[in-house]
Amino acid sequence: MMEFVWLIPALPLLGFLILSLFNKYIPKSASGYIASAMLLGSFLIVLNLLFSAISGQLIEQPPVVLFHWVHAGNLNLSLSFQIDNLSVWFMSIITGVGFLIHVYSISYMHDDEGVTRYFSYLNLFIFSMLLLVMGSNYVVMFMGWEGVGLCSYLLIGFWFKNQNYNDAAKKAFIMNRIGDLGFLLGMLLIYNQFGTLEYREVFDQASKIINPNEVSTIITVITLLLFVGAMGKSAQIPLYTWLPDAMAGPTPVSALIHAATMVTAGIYMIARSNVLYSMAPCTLDVIYIIGTGTAILAALIGLTQTDIKKVLAYSTVSQLGFMFMAIGLGGYSAGVFHVTTHAFFKALLFLGAGSVIHAMGGEQDIRKMGGLMKKLPITFITFIIATLAIAGIPPLAGFFSKDAILALAFEANPIKWGLGVFAALLTTFYMFRMLYLTFFGEFRGTQHQKEHLHESPLLMTIPLMILAALTVFSGFIEVPHVLGGHNWFSHYLAAANIALPEASHLSNSTEYLLMGTALALVVSVIFITYFLYVSKKTQPASSESEMSFLDKLSYNKFYVDELYDFVIVKPLGFLSDFNSNIIEKHFIDRIVNVSGKSIQWSGKTIRYIQSGDVNTYAIFMVIGIVVILFLNLVL
């Protein structure tokens, strides 16, 4: 299948070009099917590659070179693809989950006047993400990286007539550019140090030039700069505030950005560069601290949110923190494993939320929902499966991936395990709070909404059911030894030079105790949440005046946006206004105007010399000769 690899990104790109160039001639009802068909073609090719990867046929596979791109001095770049177990795994998630989101969107967006434009953006997004994970060098990765950033801007601001949505799109674009600057500087430093940007050549040289047992300053700086890029794309402190605002886009876009594609780009980049990160323990410590802080902060904010999509958005930020927590502990395969399970249950949660919003006529406030389980049975069943998975209830996928991270944390330090469990308990509380307020109790919406409640059509519910099945069974790819498994997924990634975690020194009894303790705490939180929001029928405060001080802090996201506005945005705005109104108008403009006027005056004055009178010219000539003779005599 290697000769057809180029088709994987080419098909979505072709879909984008067809829908963009011929949008006036394509019926709106057909655009979704065209975009989905293109992605299905890519998925089928990737599926074949996945079977080859599982059977071990892609080990040490050389890059697939499409064409040589740049030859300048010592710089040689090619547009080439690295097809190995890691890239194929991410390609499977991107095309598989992406295809389900495309199918779901056919029904969800069928009444939107810009539906053709919407599907063209989706196809371009998938193309960019595939380019990011398939590239065999950092330049191709960066091309996809930037393409994903552009597409996120287009999709978040899809309903551009709403200025708030435009502001959210610009915020996402600008905050990602901040991270991208770090990534770009890291790339330049890699080229300066190794003379190449090809993965294999960089990693081979790094392992030979630098002693793995020594801490290298240059490697530390490179990995920190690359991590800055990951912080932007994967929404880590302090570059996380764009992600909740990305909810301005259509709900399927939220599922695409938050679940399987854009936000996982940072995890992929670090996993791909794990050779460098393993040589920089200081960077791994930084990643762990930021990941843990992000997981807890986002979970604390999620406790009081009332917009169903905002709850899921902060949940995504928190789960990304878990992934970076794993990376910081040296568990690259555990981080990628959580990316996989998260892709399924978070896509399911967002699409389930979209089904709820569809039934509610666009309403997103969980305070105005309730009692939907009878009216939306398929949505409810699939939603509760995803909620149980993200809480870490066995045998669902989230249990295995979170347990792998918590086991790494305990082995590093029991305090780290405690922090991880605390973040997991917060996750359980706000997720079940949202579940109970949405599906249990009495309906709290309007009579009109109540009369029009209905289950979503098949094109929306079938993707929900497929994702629910994946949520149930995907965790079994990495069953730990203590539960009778063989850590298949870690060994699968090891074939792509992803470092295996060190052998666990925990006894079976200790692992059972850790699992049992974490599970007992999670179940306790589920029952506490049920008691509060179902038995006691507690309702979130309808206004901030009814909230406690801590609730206000959480509801207002700890005023981080306001802090950024005060510390960064307003000073920059003031500086911009000062430069525009004072420096430009009173200095630069005056200098330009004086220069122009002086040239005009000079021209008007000097033109009198050209009078056309021959006698005048003769007089000037004589005067000139006299002056020259005088100067010769004097000097």
Image: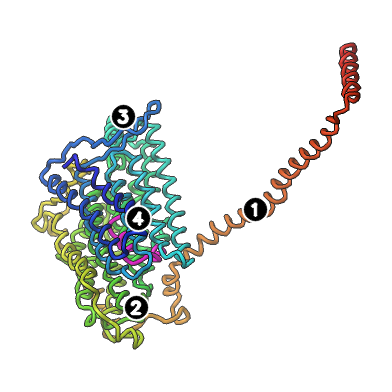
Q: Quadrant of residue 72?
A: top left
Name the magenta segment's main secondary structure: helix
The amino acid type found where label 2 is placed reads Gly
Would you say the residues marked 1 and 2 are in contact, meaning their CB atoms lie under 8 Å apart? no
Residue at image coords 38%, 56%: 152
Where is residue 430 shown, x and y percent of the image?
31, 72
Q: Secondary structure at mark 3?
A: helix
Mark 4 or mark 3, whichever is nearer to me = 4
Q: Which is nearer the N-term, disc 4 or disc 3?
A: 4
Label 1: which residue? 580
Label 4: which residue? 22
Residue at image coords 40%, 81%: 541
Separation (CA) of disc 1 from disc 4: 43 Å
Q: Which residues are magenta?
A: 244-262
Quick one: which residue is furthest to the top in this view? Answer: 633
Mark 2 or mark 4, whichever is nearer to me = 4
Residue at image coords 38%, 26%: 74
The amino acid type found where label 1 is placed reads Ser
Residue 548 drawn above or below residue 581: below
Label 3: which residue? 209
The amino acid type found where label 3 is placed reads Ile
**Quadrant, the C terminus:** top right
User: Is any atom of residue 422 visible in this view?
Assistant: no
Using a 10 Å C-alpha cutoff, classify the residue at mark 2 as few (fewer than 14 neighbours), some (14 to 19) or many (20 or more). Answer: few
| Front one among 485 and 614 | 614
Q: Secondary structure at mark 2?
A: loop
| Front one among 65 and 495 | 65
Label 2: which residue? 361
